[in-house]
Image (tube, rainbow, N blue to C red):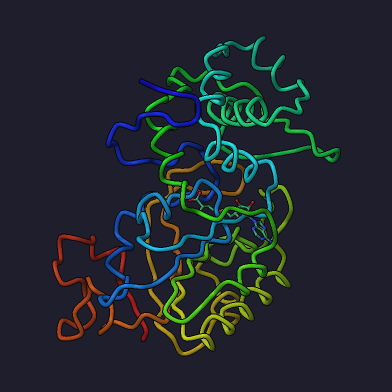
Amino acid sequence: MEKNNTPEIKETKARPFLRWAGGKMWLFKHIDLLLPKAGYNNYHEPFLGGGAMFFSLRPPHKVFLSDLNSDLIATYQTLKAEPLEVIKELRKYKNEEDFYYEIRDKKYRNSARLAAKFIFLNQTSFNGIYRVNLKGKYNVPFGYRTKEFLEKENLLSVSNALKSAIIYNGDFDLAKDNIKKKDLVFLDPPYTVSHNDNGFIKYNQKLFSLDDQYRLSKLIDAVKSKEAYYILTNAAHSIIDEIFEKGDRKLELKRTNLVGGTNAQRGHTKEFIFTNIDCADSGGFSAEKGCRPVEDDKMPLDYFNSARY
Ligand SMILES: C[S@@+](CC[C@H](N)C(=O)[O-])C[C@H]1O[C@@H](n2cnc3c(N)ncnc32)[C@H](O)[C@@H]1O
């Protein structure tokens, strides 16, 4: 029987419960191949968003999750602490246009209501982008989606997966204080520049500037000096290459871009992954095979088609 805040959790694996721009489920299906054979200690994800990497890895030790978006982080914290209250609120909701706009305009103080509102709008809106107007008000229109917005079992599994995580709101640089030797730091920042050298883009609530990219590069220097591991994903762009060139491993991934939008073109986009986990230390790669995956079918080779170590 479910008691308040001590729900019985069915053994289902928690999946991301939000649609989030820049979410990279496609990539994270393979990224565990990069991880150190010998394992890692604590896990840090300071650009949490929809948390696809965290949910995919389910790190075994202490976990630090953070993001600059305070509404997002409040939702994670509330889901961790009081999942049944959030579900109870969501049960009252209807995936209907008038109701959507009614909820979008509501101002709540109660944490469960706020979290339910965030999840509901995210699931039923036009797209997964978190966009606010100049006054900071969420302004994404209704989505006419038919998918069920309340996935109760998954929300309970998510809450369970978050139980031991330390979740906080703030700039990525705050992560530095908690990083220790052999920890893993996963960095998935917003793009500053678009792929294929197309110039600057602006799809986020607040533009992630080139200065931010340089600050991130400094954080990576700190990670390395602490002898911890990092994995960074970023747009394949010459300036990104320049900023993050540290003599570490760089993988270039090609992907068919199915996302439309004003600047996006259908075709191939390239992403970079930078990491200081070298080929010989990565569980899924073989130095003898020229740093290719140990089992070729595990990772489509055209994803990892050019690499520098
Ligand atoms: C590309 S998204 C991360 C996507 C995530 N990996 C996923 O699976 O959904 C980048 C995230 O960085 C956050 N962000 C933007 N600027 C930040 C900053 N200065 N410090 C920390 N987080 C920031 C955004 O709120 C956004 O959630």
* Residue in the picture at 63% in, 43% down: 72
Measured along the vertical axis of the image, is residue 199 above or below residue 92?
A: below
For the C terminus, which image quadrant?
Answer: bottom left
The residue positioned 45% from the left and 58% from the top of the image is: 269
In the image, residue 151 lies at what x, y percent? 42, 25
Quadrant containing ligand 1:
bottom right
Along the viewing direction, whichever of 80 and 21 lies nearer the viewer: 80
Q: Quadrant of the N terminus?
A: top left
Q: Give the percent coordinates (x, y) of residue 186.
A: 48, 66
Q: Nearer the viewer, residue 200 or 115?
A: 115
**How far from the left and from the top, in percent, is residue 104?**
71, 22
Name the residue at 45% across, 62% down. 62
| Image quadrant assignment for residue 299 | bottom left
Of 308 and 228, the residue lying toward us: 228
Position in image of residue 294 (x %, y %): 15, 72
Residue 61 falls in which quadrant of the image? bottom left
Horizontal placement of 121 versus 196: left or right? Answer: right
Q: Which of the 4 quarters of the picture holds residue 65?
A: bottom right
Q: Up-down: is 157 above or below 167?
A: above
Instruction: Look at 54% across and 89% down and name the residue there.
Output: 225
Could you tell whether 223 is left or right of 71 in the image?
A: left
Compare residues 167 and 25 and report the one nearer the observer. 167
The extreme right residue here reads 135
Count of marks, rendered view: 0
Side (left or right) of 231 relative to 115:
left
Asked if residue 299 is positioned above or below residue 257 in the image, the reply reads below
